[in-house]
Image: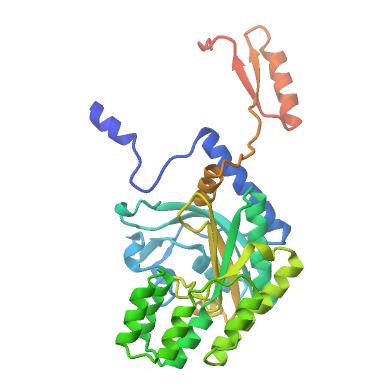
Amino acid sequence: MSKGKSQKLLHTPEGVWDHYGRDYAEYEAVQRLISDTFRSYGYEAVRTPTFEFFDVFSKEIGTIPSNELYKFFDKDGHTMVLRPDFTPSVARCAAKYYMEETKPLRFCYEGSAFTNNSNLQGKLKESTQLGAELVNERSVYADAEMLAMLIRSLLSAGLSNFQITVGNVEYFKGICDAAGIDDDMEEELREYLSGKNYYAAETLLKGGRVLPLYREQFLKIADFMKNDEDLKEVQQTAPNERAASALQRLIDVYRVLRLYGVERYVSFDLSLLSKYQYYTGIIFKAYTYGVGDAVATGGRYDTLLSQFGKDAPAIGFMIRLETLIEALRAQQIGIQVPDAPVTIVWNETNFEEKLKEAEALRREGSRVVLAQEDTTCRI
């Protein structure tokens, strides 16, 4: 093999990277802290396949666009995809093994997700995700539990300066109903509002001859709302019951979050929407300093499981580990990793004695390297 070719083999493809040494130890440490938080709330770990049938992530399901999926064929000609998102996989799993179960189901997971982004976007194509899903529970208490657990998870990782921005897809849909907006305009408007492109949104609404009253309500959803009092003020001018109920849901969730004592981490943004079409109600993202993307996203998806034959409400969230680690490092928040292993040096005359010493320490839980005195192997 030529030197040039061997050098090329040392590099990873665009959008993926290696983790090793202290770097990987920090990833493991943060992952363990978050997983422990999930389990403290009674969530049980599930593991779903890295790849699934294409239909699990199809347009009908409402996940990311097909051209952003890694697709391939198995030997039988079935179209398979590397999972871009855990939620549809967990929903399929819940429907398969808990079809008749009506009691609340609490699942958590961790693993890689894959998105075929353009190289020019500078985004990871393989990311590590940790998340949780609560199935068979539609109450505001479930919404609050998810938000509280997300907040506790970020705090357990060492993050302290962050904000969970919360919205409700139903409020946007309620205004669309009142304004008589068709599906095509709704999709385009959703894209503009979620991208904070309010000028384009206003131009679209004017071009669609949407009444000034509704144009104003669409554009007012960009207003920052700190607490439930701000929501109540907006509720007074809600155009219909659907929009008013969406606001009431957020007000009720905020009341429960006060009981958890975490309301200071929460604010509201009614323009918060998602490219994932399966979200049906409350939706949220976690933001912090030092990174450009949200460190966590989540929301309610009460119709997703019906795609797999189980009629059940659900809510969940996902923490993107790489973004969280980047934020911790940017904010110079130290990540505690295990101490370096103990090194016991042996030679040919004392190997048995040193081996016993090392094994005794290992049984006590210590990490031990048994190193030969001379680096040149004599065996």
The quarter holding residue 61 reads bottom left
Quarter in which the N terminus is drawn: top left
Question: Where is residue 215 shown, x and y percent of the image?
Answer: 41, 85
Horizontal relation, residue 288 to residue 156: left or right: left
Indicate the position of residue 6 as horizontal and vertical percent values.
Answer: 29, 30
Residue 37: x and y, percent?
68, 55
From this view, report whether residue 320 is shown above or below residue 272.
Answer: above
* Residue at the extreme top: 349
Considering only vertical position in the picture, is 321 above or below 193? above
**Residue displayed at 64% across by 66% down:** 147
Give the residue drawn at x 37%, y 86%.
183
288 sits left or right of 125 in the view: right
Is residue 274 something that shows in the picture?
Answer: yes
Q: Which of the 4 quarters of the picture holds residue 248?
A: bottom right
Q: Quadrant of residue 43?
A: bottom right
Residue shown at 72% from the left, 72% from the top: 256
